[in-house]
Amino acid sequence: MLQPTRPSATARPRAIAHWLFAVAALIVLMVLVGGITRLTESGLSITEWKPVTGAVPPLSEAQWQAEFAKYQRIPEYQLVNQGMTLAEFKTIFFWEYVHRLLGRLIGLAFFVPLVWFAVRKAIPQGFGWRLGALFALGALQGAIGWWMVTSGLSERTDVSHFRLAVHLLTALFILAGTIWTALDLLALHRDPAARPARFTRTAAIVSGLLFVQLLFGAFVAGLNAGLVANDWPLMNGRFFPSEVLEVRGFFDALVNDPAMVHWIHRWWAWLAVAGLVVLARHARRAGCRPASIALHSAFGIQILLGIATVWSSVALVLAAAHQLTGALVVAATAWAAHAAGRR
């Protein structure tokens, strides 16, 4: 068996881990702002993708009028927001602008320290490619975000829920990968002979259950499916929306019908929770009780927020908190899975 390579004298695994945790916090904030952007129907307010010059918002009345004119040419304005005032446009522009600006900030917060650590030869052997892959995924995420926006600029009045799901799930995958890498680096700091944690079979199964739940959560957001019912545990007084299957095929309804998507998101959650309980116990048996507590706390709060969001007919604060806690569930899952796979 190959022995782990000890880090060089210039390696700084602890400093890099702390930097990655800071980046992970920014990603969680990004997920929250993205949720607010979706909930306020702000995502199509900026109709162009200018990665560099777009960092500067409109500064004059003429520039604001020009941006508003671009928005007025797309179907969302013409069919949904006809008559919107410039002041109202500035409100939705704000959230999309902050969302994009935060994406640029995360890119800089990752790229600049990455280059600095690389020049200083502070990256332990075997971690350079992982950090490079995370940065590449972050760059790809920007392109995915624009790909998502383009789906709502010509024929639709909102973005494709499939593209929204890809955008959200990629962000959460980057979050999990960032945390996992940081935890590996902390382990290396504590023990220079430490090896990266294994991704166990249990962690893989639980991640699959959670992936499906997150996927349908993204579909709920993209289809505004949270509005189809405001009661729980029943939906409009019934357990299952059987009328859906009278007008749609099963697989079509599975991914395109708001009521069916909402129903699946409600009840698949309990399968995901069962898996997360098992993973938390594995983490605790591995000696990491804090990860177990964090995971139980995260999914417990998430369940309560999900129910409250339905009861409130998707109140902005509750729905945004629900998306934020979803990101924290992913972070806690990565922590618990890493603990269960430590060697």
Image (spheres, rainbow, N blue to C red):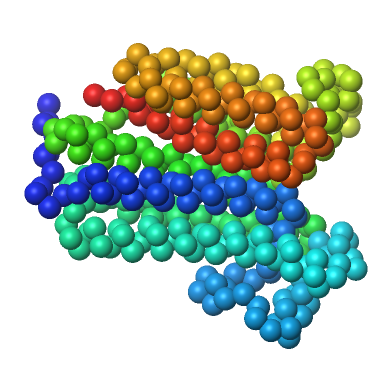
Quadrant the N terminus occupies: top left
- Quadrant hosting residue 5: top left
- Quadrant hosting residue 189: top left
Disc count in the image?
Answer: 0
Q: Residue at x 58, y 36 (%)?
A: 325
Q: Is residue 42 visible?
A: yes
Q: Residue at x 46, y 47 (%)?
A: 25
Q: Residue at x 40, y 31 (%)?
A: 335
161 or 138: nearer the viewer: 138
Horizontal side of residue 309 vs 106, given as left or right: right
Horizontal side of residue 194 vs 228, given as left or right: left
Instruction: Estimate the x, y position of residue 260 in percent, counting from the top left.
Output: 77, 30
Instruction: Estimate the x, y position of residue 215 in percent, counting from the top left.
Output: 61, 36
Q: Residue at x 69, y 84 (%)?
A: 60
Instruction: Estimate the x, y position of residue 31 in percent, counting from the top left.
Output: 57, 47
Quadrant the C terminus occupies: top left
Q: Is residue 258 visible?
A: no
Q: Which residue is situated farthest in the left direction here?
A: 9
